[in-house]
Amino acid sequence: QVQLVESGGGLVQAGGSLRLSCAASGSRLSPNYMAWFRQPPGKQREFVARLWVGGITEYAASVKGRFSISTDNAENTAYLQMNGLTVEDTAVYSCNCRLGGATDYWGQGTQVTVSS
């Protein structure tokens, strides 16, 4: 069983930056990938970014060039650096990982609110 705990959300003005953290615990296995998703108010959850175990990264078109995903394996933590935030980035951001090629785990989410 894997536990994922996000932190770092909050209120920021448009144009500002935030760094989200996702602390993982409970498994000795390396995940196939770490990812971030978000759910804007009144909308479905959407993909934001993914970092595969080999180092390949994927980003949603809406955040490419502004957001950056990384991991600190020694700390079992994934990060999402978010720059140039806009009001459209307002959402609950959730951390996700996949183990063994098939099992997904999710964190509880952290709120990011961008004011104009």
Image (tube, rainbow, N blue to C red):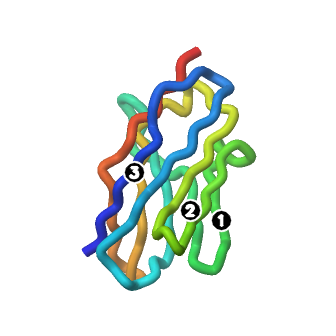
Picture residue at 52% right of the left edge, 74% below the top: 74
Q: Of 30 and 103, which appears nearest the observer?
A: 30
Residue that carries the numbered disc 2 in the rendered image: 50
Give the mark nearest the N terminus, 2 or 1. 2
Tag 2: amino acid: Arg
Q: Of 3 and 99, which appears nearest the observer?
A: 3
Tag 3: amino acid: Glu
Helix, strand or loop status at disc 2: strand
x and y percent of residue 13 in the render? 59, 21
Q: Are marks 2 and 1 in contact (CB under 8 Å)?
A: yes
Residue that carries the numbered disc 3 in the rendered image: 6
Distance in Å between CA atoms under marks 1 and 3: 20 Å
Q: Of 23 and 45, which appears nearest the observer?
A: 23
Residue that carries the numbered disc 1 in the rendered image: 57
Using a 10 Å C-alpha cutoff, classify the residue at mark 3 as few (fewer than 14 neighbours), some (14 to 19) or many (20 or more).
many
Query: Residue 66's quadrant in the figure?
Result: top right
Q: In the displayed structure, would residue 13 be above or below residue 31?
A: above
